[in-house]
Amino acid sequence: MIVLDNVSKVYDTRQGHRTVLEGINLHIAKGEKLGILGRNGAGKSTLIRLISGAELPTSGRIHRGLSISWPLAFGGAFQGSLSGFDNVRFICRVYNASIEPAVAFVEKFSELGAYLREPVKKYSSGMRARLAFAISMAVEFDCFLIDEIVAVGDSRFHEKCFVELFEKRSDRAMIIVSHSADYIRAHCQHAAVLVAGKLHRFEQVDDAFAFYQSQSM
Amino acid sequence: MREVITRYGRHNIGFLWLFLEPMLFTLGVTTLWTVIGVTHGSTLPITAFAITGYSSILLWRNCSNRAVKAIEPNLALLYHRNVRVFDVFAARLTLEIAGASTSIIVLTVLFTSIGWMNQPADILTAVTGWVLLAWFAFSLSLAVGAASERSEIIERVWHIFTYLMFPLSGAGFMVGWLPKPYQNIILYVPMVNGTEMIRHGYFGSVVRTYENPSYLILFNVILTFIGLALMRETGRRVEPE
C-alpha cells in the first residue's frame, strides 16, 4: 500500500513560488494499476518523483508500504562515464539486489553485447533506452513507476519490453503517467487526471478520459 | 554508503592518480622549498617540514574544491531514492581524504627509508593531528559544497579564498617563528592548529609547537553541524535531472 497524505510541492522559480502540486491524496493497493493523465507541465513527472522519493514534498507525508522502482523513463538514472555493466552493478548495490543474475539478465535482454563494456555516454539514445529498460527489469519491485513511455528502439524490442513489463509482471502495482489516453486505457484499471495541481480520481478510465477531454478544451 | 564509494573506485582506470597526484605535488613543493630554504635558517629538517606542511594543505584544499558543485555531475544518481545528497559528498570526500593520507604515508616511509628525514617522533600525535585536520576538511567541504549549490558566487570566490588561505594555513611557517602577538591571532585559524599538531608529532621536542587541539575539535564540531544542516537543506531543494 502506498499512501500520499495531503502532499504539496512548491518550486522556487524566477517568477517566485510556483505551486505545482497541491493537497494530493492518493492510495495505491498492491497490484493496482493507476494511470495519471495530464497535459505537458501539469506536474505528472513531479508527482512520480515524489512517490519514488527522488524529490521530497514541500509538505505532506508519503508512506511507502511497497518497494517502489525509480521513475522508469528510458533514460536518466545513469552515470554516463561508467560502462553499462558498471551501471548495472551500481544499481544492484543501491537497491540491494544480487548482482550476477542481474548482469546476466541485462546482457541477454538488452542485446547490447560488447557495448556493455563501453561508457554509457557513448551510447546512442536507442541503446541507452535498451540498457535503461533492461536494468529496470533486472531489479524486482512491487510497484513500478512509469513516466511517459514511448516506443523504445525498433518494434521488436518494443514488443519484448511490453511482454516483460505487462505480461510477466502483471501482478505488480503500476503507476503510469502519460498524456496519451490510449496507452493508459490499455494498461490501467483506474485513472486520475492532474489539472492545476489537483488530482481528480476516477474509478473508470473512460470517465477520467472524458474529464480530461473537457478540461483540455 | 559504501556502495557509492566502491563505485567511485572504478571511475578512473588509473586510480593510482588518486594519491600519485598529491604525492607529486608535495614532492615538487619539497624540492622547491629545499632549494630556496624556507626554514629561514632554523634547524628543522626541510623535507619533513615541507611534507607535513604541503600534505596538510592538500588535504583541506582538495576536499573543499572537489565539494564545490559536486551535485551536478551526479544528478542522475539522485534519481534513486537510496542515494541522497550526503552520499555524493561522502563518496567524494572519503576518496579525497584517502588519497591525501596515502600520499603523506608513502612519502614519509619513502624518505625515512632513504634517510632524508627521521622517523616521526610521536606517531600518535601526528596521526591525531592528521585525523582532526581530515575531520576539519570533511565538515568544511560539506558546508562549502552545500553553499556552492545555493549561489554561484561561492563557487567563484572559494578558489580565491583557498589561495589566500595558503600562506595563512601554517604550511610554510611554524607558529613559534612569529612574534608573540601574532601567534595568538594565527592560532584562531583552525588549519594552523592541525598542521602544528602534525609537526609536533613529527619533530617531537626538537621544536616548540603551539597547537590547541580542543579549539580545533570545537571548531570541527560546530562546522560539522553547520555542514550537515546545510546539506539537509540542499537535499530538500535538489531536483534530479
Image (cartoon, coloured by chain):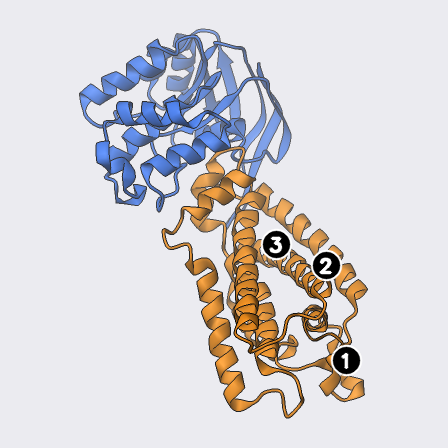
Q: Is residue A96 above or below residue B216?
A: above
Where is residue A195 drawn, in percent x and y? 47, 25
The chain containing the residue under callout 1 comes to: B
The C terminus of chain B, quarter of image: top left
**Amino acid, disc 2:** Asn
Q: Choose mark 2 or mark 1, whichever is in front.
A: 1
**B124 on left or right of A84:** right
Q: Tell me, by letter, which chain the rendering colours blue.
A: A
**Amino acid, disc 1:** Arg
Q: Earlier in the sequence, mark 2 or mark 1?
A: 1
Tag 3: Cα neighbours inside 10 Å, few (<14), some, or many (≥20)?
many
Q: Is residue A113 above or below residue B76?
A: above
Which residue: 53% across, 44% down? B238
Residue closer to the observer: A95 or A176: A95
Q: Earlier in the sequence, mark 3 or mark 2?
A: 3
**Secondary structure under the numbered disc 1 in the rendered image:** loop
Residue B46, picture quadrant:
bottom right
Q: Are marks 3 and 2 in contact (CB under 8 Å)?
A: no
**B44 on left or right of A93:** right
